[in-house]
């Protein structure tokens, strides 16, 4: 991150998802037992929080977290996000499903309804459990402000923000005026790890709950039909006999299964 120009305090909003910890989801057969999985701050959302806090440390201003809870809510996990340096959090509960359009609409509604001021809105490029990468551009549409996605390097100069977008074939430099939305990648920074004491102190920071029933959440409908775990089935074939006949049989089985030709 590169900051230029006179010191101007920025009001920053960070969109944070409490995502299922994909490394600890129990599986039975091909079923994901999400009701038994813990949640965590989505990995790349930590990069967004870190970038926001670094800007605040340089320019001044404030960092507000907005979290739309679509699964289990764990306040201690949210405290970890606040402990990184955010000032307060708005939490929307009562929204089920995995519809990014509805999530983006909820964030936009909270910002409007609660009168949250912002110069910059930061998001992770995608959540670590769903990774739709759709919330940032949808939120920009709802708020009618510009968006720069997949940013690995950020630069702010007065009221201009520049983002270096990471593409498969190289880089693209995009700039726009604030206010704007930026979705960042994990390359943008290395998130700090708050201490236990910082997490405990974060429990006293302002956390404001917003009922989803008080918001206008009309958005395009998305139905998630089914999510299955990958099931690996072993052949369990025992091959006996001498080395050469056994090797011939192994090759025959591999050809039969299409592993080799």
Image (spheres, grey):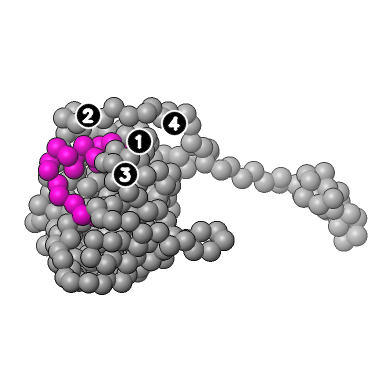
Disc 3, SS: helix
User: In the rendered image of this protein, does residue 48 appear above or below residue 15?
Assistant: below
Q: Position of residue 64 (x, y in %)?
A: 18, 53
Q: Earlier in the sequence, mark 2 or mark 3?
A: 3
Residue identifier under label 4: 224
> Of discs 4 and 2, which sits in the foreground?
2
In the rendered structure, does residue 68 fall within the stretch colored magenta? no
Q: Position of residue 18 (x, y in %)?
A: 30, 48
* On-image quarter of the N terminus: bottom left
Q: Which of marks 3 and 1 is nearer the N terminus?
A: 1
Q: Disc 3 versus disc 4: distance between alpha carbons? A: 24 Å
CB atoms of marks 2 and 3 within 8 Å:
no
Near mark 1 (Cα within 10 A), the count class, few <14, some 14-19 or many ≥20, is many
Residue identifier under label 2: 216
User: Which residues lie in the magenta part?
Assistant: 103-120
At a point 35% along the width and 62% down the height, the residue shown is 162
At a point 55% along the width and 59% down the height, the residue shown is 168
Q: Disc 3 versus disc 1: distance between alpha carbons? A: 11 Å
Residue identifier under label 3: 140
């Amino acid at each position: 991150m590169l900051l230029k120009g006179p010191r101007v305090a920025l009001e920053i909003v960070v969109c944070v998802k409490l995502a299922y910890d994909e490394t600890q989801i129990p599986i039975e057969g091909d079923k994901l037992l999400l009701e038994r999985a813990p949640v965590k701050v989505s990995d790349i959302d930590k990069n967004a929080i870190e970038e926001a806090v670094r800007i605040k440390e340089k320019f001044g201003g404030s960092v507000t977290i907005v979290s739309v809870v679509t699964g289990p809510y764990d306040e201690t996990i949210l405290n970890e996000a606040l402990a990184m340096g955010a000032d307060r959090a708005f939490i929307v509960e009562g929204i089920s499903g995995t519809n990014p359009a509805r999530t983006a609409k909820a964030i936009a509604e909270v910002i409007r309804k609660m009168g949250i001021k912002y110069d910059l809105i930061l998001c992770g490029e995608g959540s670590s459990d769903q990774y739709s990468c759709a919330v940032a551009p949808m939120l920009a549409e709802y708020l009618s402000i510009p968006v720069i996605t997949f940013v690995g390097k950020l630069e702010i100069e007065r009221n201009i923000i520049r983002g270096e977008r990471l593409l498969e074939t190289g880089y693209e430099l995009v700039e726009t005026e604030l206010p704007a939305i930026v979705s960042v990648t994990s390359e943008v920074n290395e998130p700090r790890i708050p201490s236990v004491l910082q997490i405990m102190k974060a429990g006293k920071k302002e956390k404001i709950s917003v009922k989803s029933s008080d918001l206008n959440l009309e958005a395009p409908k998305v139905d998630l039909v089914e999510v299955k775990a990958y099931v690996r089935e072993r052949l369990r074939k025992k091959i006996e006999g001498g080395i050469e006949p056994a090797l011939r049989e192994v090759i025959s089985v591999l050809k039969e299964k299409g592993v080799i030709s």
